[in-house]
């Protein structure tokens, strides 16, 4: 046993602050324009509210599972952030489990943010033109790939019943949105886009290309400043 833990929840202001920060960041790179995009962004908002509501407000998932996990995992302390964490509980409450979970989630989040940023930079610099280089040489929708990695990172970092249920709907919403955008691009750019689509994966390039996918230099900042 790890002793008595304090109540680490009820921090609704912190939950609201985190929802606002992450939503601001995502909106900075994925600006909704039409009804379809706003509906998809609505699912993102709901996911963030469910995530941070449980992370800082009330640990609904771990509380509901306490009866199932308590006897098998005496480390469980449902109102403590560390020993009420689902993955840490399932892996026996070790510090190594905590470090691995947080480290892996951080890597996924950083990868996602990198792709969101690089994809936005290229789209902004193209001024409405067809973009097929940089990160777009490896995936047709690198910004959505980045969003998917962020969602997976959050699921690793703080899994909850609600977010696990919502994640497939969120991913489906953006896969559907990507298909809508591709139809528009095909109408606008014709054969040039069809040729690009034939040779470029939609979201995830082959594993051997991931290093280049994440580290490619989009454009020198001085060149961007001169445009």
Image (tube, rainbow, N blue to C red):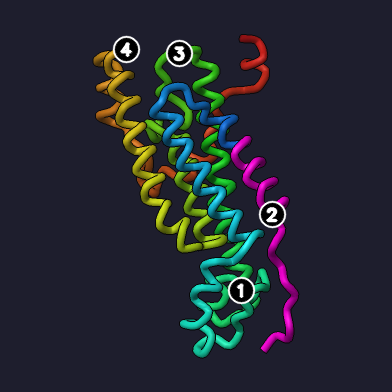
For label 4, the residue is 188
Locate the N terminus by quadrant.
bottom right
For label 3, the residue is 128
For label 1, the residue is 84
How far apart marks 2 and 4 lie (CA) works out to: 46 Å
Locate the C terminus by quadrant.
top right
Q: Give the mark nearest the N terminus, 4 or 1.
A: 1
Residue occupying the point 49% across, 76% down = 65
Above/below status of 171 relative to 155: above
Q: Give the mark nearest the N terminus, 2 or 3.
A: 2
Q: Give the mark nearest the N terminus, 2 or 4.
A: 2
Q: Taking 182 as reference, is 213 left or right? A: right
Q: Nearer the viewer, residue 93 or 201?
A: 93
Q: Nearer the viewer, residue 147 or 193?
A: 147
Question: Total label count?
Answer: 4
Residue occupying the point 39% across, 45% down = 171
- Image location of residue 76, percent across then percent down: 59, 81
């Amino acid at each position: 046993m790890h002793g008595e833990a304090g109540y680490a929840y009820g921090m609704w202001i912190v939950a609201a602050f985190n929802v606002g920060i992450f939503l601001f960041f995502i909106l900075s790179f994925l600006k909704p324009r039409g009804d379809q995009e706003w509906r998809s962004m609505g699912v993102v908002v709901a996911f963030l509210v469910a995530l941070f509501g449980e992370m800082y407000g009330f640990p609904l998932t771990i509380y509901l599972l306490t009866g199932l996990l308590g006897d098998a995992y005496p480390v469980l302390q449902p109102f403590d952030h560390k020993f009420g964490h689902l993955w840490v509980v399932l892996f026996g409450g070790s510090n190594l489990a905590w470090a691995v979970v947080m480290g892996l989630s951080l890597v996924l989040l950083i990868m996602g943010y990198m792709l969101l940023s690089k994809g936005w930079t290229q789209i902004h610099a193209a001024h409405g033109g067809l973009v097929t280089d940089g990160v777009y040489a490896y995936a047709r929708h690198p910004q959505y790939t980045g969003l998917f990695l962020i969602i997976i990172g959050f699921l690793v970092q703080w899994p909850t019943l609600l977010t696990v249920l919502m994640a497939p709907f969120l991913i489906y919403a953006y896969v559907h949105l990507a298909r809508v955008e591709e139809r528009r691009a095909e109408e606008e750019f014709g054969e040039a886009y069809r040729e690009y689509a034939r040779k470029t994966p939609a979201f995830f390039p082959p594993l051997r290309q991931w290093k280049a996918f994440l580290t490619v230099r989009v454009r020198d900042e001085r060149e961007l400043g001169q445009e």
